[in-house]
Image (cartoon, helix red, strand yellow):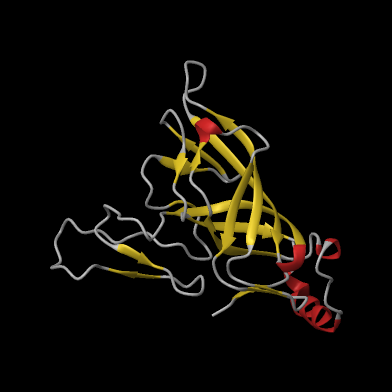
Amino acid sequence: MKTRFSSLAFVLLASSMCLAQQATSSTPAATQHLATAGQQHGVFTVELAKDINSKKLKVGDPIEAKVFSAIDVSNGTTIPPGSQIIGHVTEVTLRSKGSEQSTLGIAFDKIQLAKGEEIPIKGFIQAMAPNPNKPLNTGGYIEYGNSLNMQTQRPPAPPSSSQQQVPLLNNESTGVLGIKGLQLDKNGVLTSNAKEIKIDSGTRMLLNVTM
């Protein structure tokens, strides 16, 4: 199933919702690049391409991720799974005498398509969940389908009171789910009481994106 990436208006009076929807249906589709800026807003899941260690990062360093499921943009463009998403580090601090927490901020800037095409975006991390391909100590595992409608399953073992359901990402997910000692604020900045922030490749992130 493809992820639907629909157009939403940021300022919309409740009394004019029907009229706005009719106007949208009769308006020509926006173009793929800059003409779409600020007109399309949605969330979709990506997978971190490489391990991250905030101790080795500085502001401006690139961060790479991959689109998990195909995305249909309202202008007719389809962003295939595996497309690269490029971001950068916006802030990084390590816990020290002058800082009680480690922080790591990441913003996503563009989606790279085939033949060198790029779609500019403004994206931040809305939610994060563990890499489903690595063992977890939560008593279950995450099964990610081909859409944002993910499912939870338990391993084929006798149920016990110690088993816990694995947290899932969905369109409304916020914060860090299932990764101990890591938090995420409303601006998409990760924080931890550890000396540094480490994130495994394959970690799933729900991005909040405007195009």
In the rendered structure, the answer to whether residue 121 lies left or right of residue 185 reads right
Does residue 12 show up? no
Q: Position of residue 17 (x, y in %)?
A: 74, 75
Measured along the vertical axis of the image, is residue 35 above or below residue 108?
below
Q: Quadrant of residue 20?
A: bottom right
Taking the spot 81% from the left edge, 78% from the top edge, the residue there is: 24
Q: Residue at x 51, y 73 (%)?
A: 147
| 68 and 114: which is toward the camera | 114
Which quadrant would the N terminus be assigned to in this image? bottom right
Q: Is residue 65 visible?
A: yes
- Is 59 left, or right, of 36 in this rendering? left
Residue farthest top in this picture: 97
Q: Quadrant of the C terminus?
A: bottom right
Where is residue 206 drawn, in percent x and y?
54, 58
Residue 84 in picture, x, y percent from top left: 63, 60
At horizontal 55% and vertical 37% (from top left) the residue drawn is 104
> Across the whole image, how many numbered discs are drawn on residues?
0
Side of 131 where 162 appears, left or right: left
Which residue extends farthest front? Answer: 115
Residue 210 vs residue 112, the one in the foreground? 112
For the residue pair 72 and 114, the one nearer the viewer reads as 114
> Residue shown at 53%/32% (left/top)?
56
* Frontmost residue, 174 versus 45: 45
